[in-house]
Amino acid sequence: MIADPPAISARRPRPTRLRRLILAAVTAAATLTATVAVAPSSGASIPPPPSGWSTVFSDDFTGASGTGLNTANWLYDTGTGYPGGAGNWGTGEVETMTNSTQNVYQDGNGDLVIKPLRDGSGHWTSGRVETQRTDFAAPSGGKLRMEASIQQPNVSGAAAAGYWPAFWALGAAARPVGATNWPSIGEIDVMEDINGRSSEFATLHCGTNPGGPCNETTGIGSGERACGGCQTGFHQYAVEYDRSVSPEQLRYYLDGNNFFTINANQVDATTWNNALHHGFFMILNVAMGGGFPAAFGGGPTGSTQSGVPMLVDYVRVLTSGGGGTTPPPSGGKAITGYGGLCLDDRSSDTTNFNPIQVYTCNGTAAQQWTVVEAGSTLHVLGKCLDINGGGTANGTKVDLYDCNNTAAQVWIPQSNGALYNPQSNRCLDDTGWSTTPGTQVEIWDCTGGANQVWHLPS
């Protein structure tokens, strides 16, 4: 038997990724829904999207040898944790993440290289990068696919002790300082391996920590799955979030084979929606040490080999189906807020960017709101409640816009009556506690105040 990972005493305000390892095989419940090619060799072009899919983001890492990443697409995590968060990224890792081209660079052959290095004093450095974009979301009624072609660090045995490569994604609310509300905002671990075991683990983190509906800090996981040749060649790792089926599904793939599936009805609807009905950003990193490698013998040790990289040939994000053109259901109702005023589309104007305001309740169509997809969007007059420009700062105004399935249109009802937007980590707010009809609403830090209490149609 393999022992559970040891608990980390200081829980961080940051995704934990430490999990108890699930040894029992889990039967995959879904069939492959898209025809995808086996991952190409190093430097090969990104394969074309399968029929019915559209590419919304990709990077083929074609920069010159020794160059850093395109910072229009990527940002570097540096140090040992997010500002204000727990050290060692909350997992017990021992490396310091850097933006040095010694640790993170393009190799001139079409690959991203993330290389852990040990210095003469035994200290480790490595690399961790995130996509700038945080709006990778499954369209309502459609599918999202996040995919990468990766060669895991080519090291095994005692020389691999402590290696922890990963390809994963976090809910948009983790920006900019590390998701104090993890795991509720969702973490999708597409591929993790530890200690060069020629395997992979797939996990969804959600709900509350510790325990909760997703059994945190373990999460809902595949357990260890064989991944033959994953240290010596490129393999395609992918996850699909499918909102076209009922119940919704999260499906994990290795080289096009669906090996693990999570169904929405495995947890309650609020937990599922909070974890998945919003945008995500992707992360690539190689950690050294921590609770997960410790569960398989620990490390790094004096025998651990320095300088063995994870290679990434490409990453991409695809979407299929859905979209914002489906008309909302009929029969909307008023949303009432502070002072008894109603949420209102100013002058019943359906022009994009038209202000959403509080106004005297009058029963007009401009106040007939429909809760769509279990509260993840709010429709009126055929359009959606939207944060202007996808902004995340306090005071960003809220307006009307074409429904587009972005994170700026996600509103999760909270038990205290607030409408929470995960991307900004803020709530819909009656500006200045106004009782003056015509005041445009905004987003603001979630305070629990009466000016953030909204009574939704049922």
Image: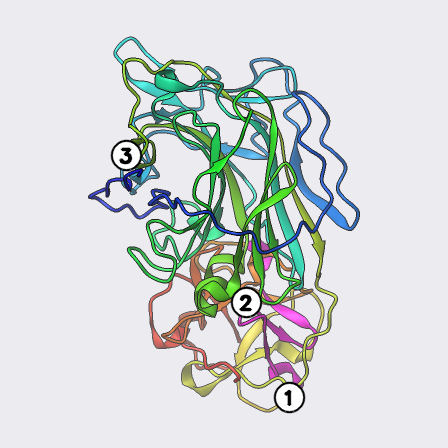
x, y (%) of residue 308?
A: 45, 16
Q: Quadrant of residue 163?
A: top left
Residue count near mark 2 (Cα–Cα under 10 Å), binned few <14, some 14–19, many ≥20: many
Q: Which residue is mark 3?
A: 92
Q: Is residue 43 visible?
A: yes
Rendered image: mark on residue 376: 2
Residue at the spot x=58%, y=79% of the render? 344
Q: Which residue is mark 1?
A: 364
Residue at the spot x=31%, y=13% of the render? 303
Figure check: 440 above or below 230 = below
What is the spatial separation of the Cα atoms under label 2 and label 1, in whole angstroms?
23 Å
**SS class, disc 3:** loop
131 or 120, nearer to the observer? 120
Q: Does 203 sit left or right of 230 as displayed?
A: left
Residue count near mark 1 (Cα–Cα under 10 Å), binned few <14, some 14–19, many ≥20: few
113 or 343, nearer to the observer? 113
Q: Earlier in the sequence, mark 3 or mark 1?
A: 3
Q: Inspect the magenta stretch and tell me whether residue 380 lies in it.
A: yes
